[in-house]
């Protein structure tokens, strides 16, 4: 009896031991999912983090100390946020598509892995490498535009702006769900903006320059152009529009791509590409429009932190789908929100510590509905003091609006569509469609049944996504059989 009690006590003690004492943390089972799902997308050949590939155990093991430093909260950087993954927006302020962050448990697990010897484990149990597309971060493009020749960049430590014309030679409007810039030189290409212009309207500028393209500091040099159609900044990854949304390149118009090459200290060259993901015109429900909040009149005094607060009145109901706050080296923070006529606050984005090297086009998790009469507020702070390590002037100098990296900007493009009922339930990120949820409220109920019946009776018009969600039996048509199917599903959920 005594031996049985002792054995039982030993078994209970072993069961109660921490898991780390029973089984060592290893790369294959514990660490590879963290790395491959959060890091490898950028840290692989052809991407912005190619200088530090993280595609297998050896690469992670050899760089384990740097990775631990980069993912560990650091009070001296970004208000205590880790360096990696790079995500400047405040996660508690608003929810955005593609948020990059590691949990405290994942960070601790990585540190514990190193402490225990950073073992590989069984390679057969390694997390499968995601299927990353080649030559793109989001998929296979329908149109690939490549610069005709490499552009030479002098190592004179000066900004260099150059425009390149791409003749699309299309007799019809081109609708696209995404436009992706693929820099040929991640070190030299700082940012890119793209517009469309009437065919041939920039040809004279191109002909006057004896090199490929033409210099275009401060603008594109043309009279008529579209709003911004796309662009690039360090770390950006375009979101691909769904839900029948698209942007448009007018029929017959040319694209102009303005490349801003940042100051470099040695000669370099660049051969960039632009990927365009098209969408059939008959699948487009709404064309995305844009407005830009811009202030070229400010003056930032030296040895002072300054704040610029601008507003934009919204005259009709809109749904916000994207925004891109932009500053230069003196940028300190951004906050963008809307105030409705009922004094409700709708948060867009808050960046507590502006980082010039990580800028992005941001997308809310769901469309943001702004009723007519709302006011968008954009507040940017600038640190023109010696305590700003990125200040290009020592001692600090008066700084004004300008295109040079050493100038400053208050620039906020905002993309929107006219509001339609139910927009606030439409997700802008990659989400599986819940069959039958045609009002996109996240559940199946009698309202969805009414919607589908009204569509069958030609009382209601549906978007592409609503049609896809309504085809309950996947037979390619919406009819009474789909109504029966959704009713059966609703009844089964209530049992």
Image (tube, rainbow, N blue to C red):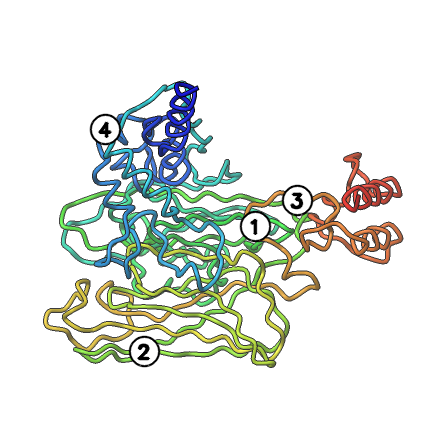
Q: Which residue is mark 2?
A: 307
Q: CA distance from mark 3 to mark 2?
A: 43 Å
Q: Which residue is mark 1?
A: 241
Residue 451, horizontal then vertical, whole percent = 81, 55
Seen in the picture, residue 440 relative to 7 is either above or below; the reply is: below
Seen in the picture, residue 280 relative to 311 is either above or below; the reply is: above
Residue 314, horizontal then vertical, whole percent = 57, 76
Seen in the picture, residue 129 relative to 466 is either above or below; the reply is: above
Q: Which residue is mark 3?
A: 433
Going from the N terminus, do you reach mark 3 or mark 1 first?
Answer: 1
Nearer to us in this view, 376 or 431: 431
Residue 69, horizontal then vertical, whole percent = 23, 45
Going from the N terminus, do you reach mark 3 or mark 2 first?
Answer: 2
Q: Are marks 2 and 1 in contact (CB under 8 Å)?
A: no
Residue 117, numbered circle: 4
Q: CA distance from mark 2 to mark 1?
A: 34 Å
Nearer to us in this view, 83 or 317: 83
Element carrying mark 1: loop
Going from the N terminus, do you reach mark 3 or mark 4 first?
Answer: 4
* Residue at screen point 57% across, 55% down: 248
């Amino acid at each position: 009896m005594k031996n049985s009690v002792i054995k039982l006590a030993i078994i209970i003690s072993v069961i109660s031991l921490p898991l780390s004492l029973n089984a060592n943390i290893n790369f294959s089972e514990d660490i590879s999912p963290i790395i491959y799902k959060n890091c490898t997308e950028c840290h692989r050949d052809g991407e912005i983090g190619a200088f530090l590939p993280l595609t297998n155990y050896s690469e992670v093991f050899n760089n384990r100390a740097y990775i631990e430093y980069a993912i560990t909260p650091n009070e001296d950087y970004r208000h205590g946020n880790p360096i990696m993954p790079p995500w400047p927006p405040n996660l508690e302020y608003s929810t955005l598509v593609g948020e990059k962050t590691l949990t405290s448990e994942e960070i601790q697990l990585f540190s514990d892995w190193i402490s225990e010897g950073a073992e590989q484990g069984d390679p057969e149990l390694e997390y499968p490498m995601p299927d990353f597309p080649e030559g793109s971060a989001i998929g296979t493009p329908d149109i690939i535009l490549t610069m005709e020749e490499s552009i030479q960049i002098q190592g004179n430590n000066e900004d260099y702006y150059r425009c390149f014309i791409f003749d699309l030679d299309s007799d019809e409007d081109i609708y696209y769900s995404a436009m992706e810039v693929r820099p040929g030189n991640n070190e030299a290409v700082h940012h890119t903006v793209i517009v469309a212009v009437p065919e041939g309207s920039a040809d004279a500028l191109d002909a006057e320059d004896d090199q490929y393209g033409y210099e275009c500091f401060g603008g594109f040099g043309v009279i008529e152009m579209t709003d911004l159609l796309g662009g690039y900044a360090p770390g950006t990854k375009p979101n691909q529009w769904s839900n029948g949304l698209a942007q448009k390149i007018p029929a017959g118009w040319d694209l102009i791509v303005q490349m801003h090459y940042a100051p470099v200290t040695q000669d370099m060259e660049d051969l960039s590409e632009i990927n365009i993901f098209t969408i059939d015109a008959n699948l487009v429900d709404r064309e995305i429009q844009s407005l830009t909040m811009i202030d070229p009149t400010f003056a930032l005094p030296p040895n002072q932190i300054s704040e610029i607060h601008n507003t934009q009145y919204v005259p009709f109901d809109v749904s916000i789908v994207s925004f891109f706050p932009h500053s230069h080296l003196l940028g300190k923070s951004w906050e963008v929100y809307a105030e409705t006529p009922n004094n409700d606050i709708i948060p867009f984005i808050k960046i507590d510590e502006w980082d010039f090297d990580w800028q992005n086009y941001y997308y809310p998790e769901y469309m943001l509905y702004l009723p007519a009469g709302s006011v968008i507020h954009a507040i940017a702070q600038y640190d023109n003091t010696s305590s700003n390590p990125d200040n290009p002037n020592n001692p600090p100098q008066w700084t004004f609006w300008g295109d040079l990296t050493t100038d400053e900007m208050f620039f906020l493009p905002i993309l929107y569509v006219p509001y339609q009922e139910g927009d606030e339930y439409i997700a802008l990120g990659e989400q599986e469609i819940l069959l039958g949820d045609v009002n996109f409220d996240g559940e199946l109920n009698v309202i969805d049944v009414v919607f589908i019946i009204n569509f069958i009776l030609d009382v209601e018009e549906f978007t592409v996504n609503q049609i896809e969600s309504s085809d309950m039996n996947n037979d390619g048509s919406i009819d009474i059989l789909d109504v029966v199917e959704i009713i059966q599903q609703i009844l089964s959920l209530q049992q």
